Amino acid sequence: MRHVVTIYLLTALAGFSACHAANAATQTRHAQHHTANMCQLSKPTTNATAWPRATGFLNEGSTTIYVICGYPSPEGGYGTATEQRIILMTLDGQPHSIDCTGVAGMWPGSNDTVFVTKNITTSHSAELGGDFLVFLPEDFNLPQGSTLPASFSITCKLPAQTGINDGYTTSTTNVGN
């Protein structure tokens, strides 16, 4: 009889836990990533005039450069990012066309890596907030409401006198009940 009661209590507790977890609350989180930590030259050279600064990753030179920015896993962990943003800016006040390629890898059940290139014309300085370029799951042919896989990066072809101000991640996190 004692074992029957113990089994009954354990079964009831397991059922309660499963129901409790099914009703777990989630919360949207926004994380800012400073470019001094997340970006670097994709093709380093000794005469480059681009580097991370307190105000962003800046191309203060006269030639186009490639910069890669790796996004850390969001607070919720693997595969919880709902969007990745990069903020681009002009340094000379002139509009500049910038191509950036979002790269998503480590797809669940697959080793495929998917590349999506977007273009933006930036005409705002850092003081004006820069211009946002957003990558969503739909850009990678994932159903609406999906999340981006881990191992996400953005590589930008930065013309002279442009820069990357910041990166942002929006994600969902399980915060309990």
Image (cartoon, rainbow, N blue to C red):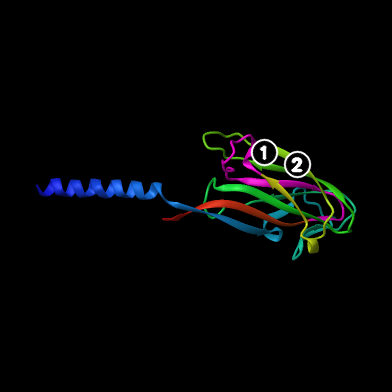
Q: Residues within 10 Å of mark 2 (few under 14, many from 20)?
A: some
**Residue holding disc 1:** 139
* Residue 44: image location, x then y, percent: 77, 51
Residue 111 in the image, given as x and y percentages of width and height: 57, 34
Q: Residue at x 41, y 49 (%)?
A: 23
Residue 42: x and y in percent read 75, 48
The quarter in which the C terminus is drawn is bottom left
Along the line of sight, the residue nearer the viewer: 66 or 23: 23
Name of the residue lying farthest toward the bottom: 54
Residue range corresponding to the magenta coloring: 136-163
Relative to 87, residue 116 above or below:
above
Q: Which residue is mark 2?
A: 118
Q: Amino acid at mark 1?
A: Asp
How many marks overall? Answer: 2
Provide the secondary structure element on which disc 1 rests.
helix
Q: Do the numbered discs 2 and 1 sit on residues whose CB atoms are within 8 Å? A: yes
Name the residue at 19% across, 46% down: 8
* Horizontal arrangement in the rendering, residue 50 relative to residue 137 (left or right): right
